[in-house]
């Protein structure tokens, strides 16, 4: 078995990773090529030389509570924690 990447020809996007028998005559769908997967995976892009991982997703936006916590003074933070724990 050989690990192969199914890649869209138009943009190099790795659609899937498949395993093929070494003597397989399977042909990829039109508009796709099969390459040795090496370290590539679904969602990567083949740039003609290497597989490139997509950039990490951006973190979710901060909540109002997180923004208030970041802006608060130490005394305010102690008070916020106290309220959350039921001390105030």
Image (cartoon, rainbow, N blue to C red):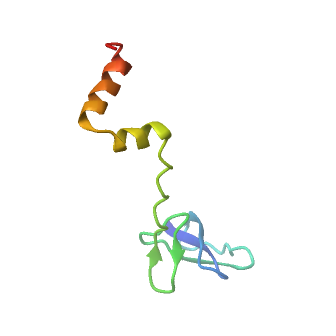
Position of 11 with respect to 70 (left or right) is right
Position of 60 with respect to 81 (left or right) is right
Q: Which residue lies furthest to the left in this view?
A: 74
Q: In this view, does 17 lie above or below 86?
A: below
Query: Residue 21 location in percent, x, y?
Result: 55, 67
Nearest the viewer among 19 and 12 is: 12
Quadrant containing the C terminus is top left
Query: Residue 8 location in percent, x, y?
Result: 65, 76
Q: Which residue lies furthest to the bottom in this view?
A: 48
Residue at horizontal 52 percent and vertical 78 percent from the top: 46
Residue at horizontal 24 percent and vertical 36 percent from the top: 74
Query: Residue 77 location in percent, x, y?
Result: 30, 32
Position of 40 with respect to 84 (left or right) is right
Residue at horizontal 75 percent and vertical 78 percent from the top: 30
Query: Residue 1 location in percent, x, y?
Result: 50, 65
Q: Residue furthest top?
A: 87
């Amino acid at each position: 078995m050989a690990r192969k990447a199914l890649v869209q020809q138009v943009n190099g996007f790795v659609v899937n990773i498949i395993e093929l028998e070494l003597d397989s005559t399977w042909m990829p769908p039109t508009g796709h090529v099969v390459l040795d997967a090496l370290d590539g995976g679904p969602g990567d892009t083949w740039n003609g030389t290497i597989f490139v991982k997509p950039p990490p997703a951006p973190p979710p936006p901060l909540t109002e509570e997180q923004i208030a916590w970041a802006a608060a003074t130490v005394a305010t933070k102690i008070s916020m924690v106290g309220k959350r724990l039921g001390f105030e």
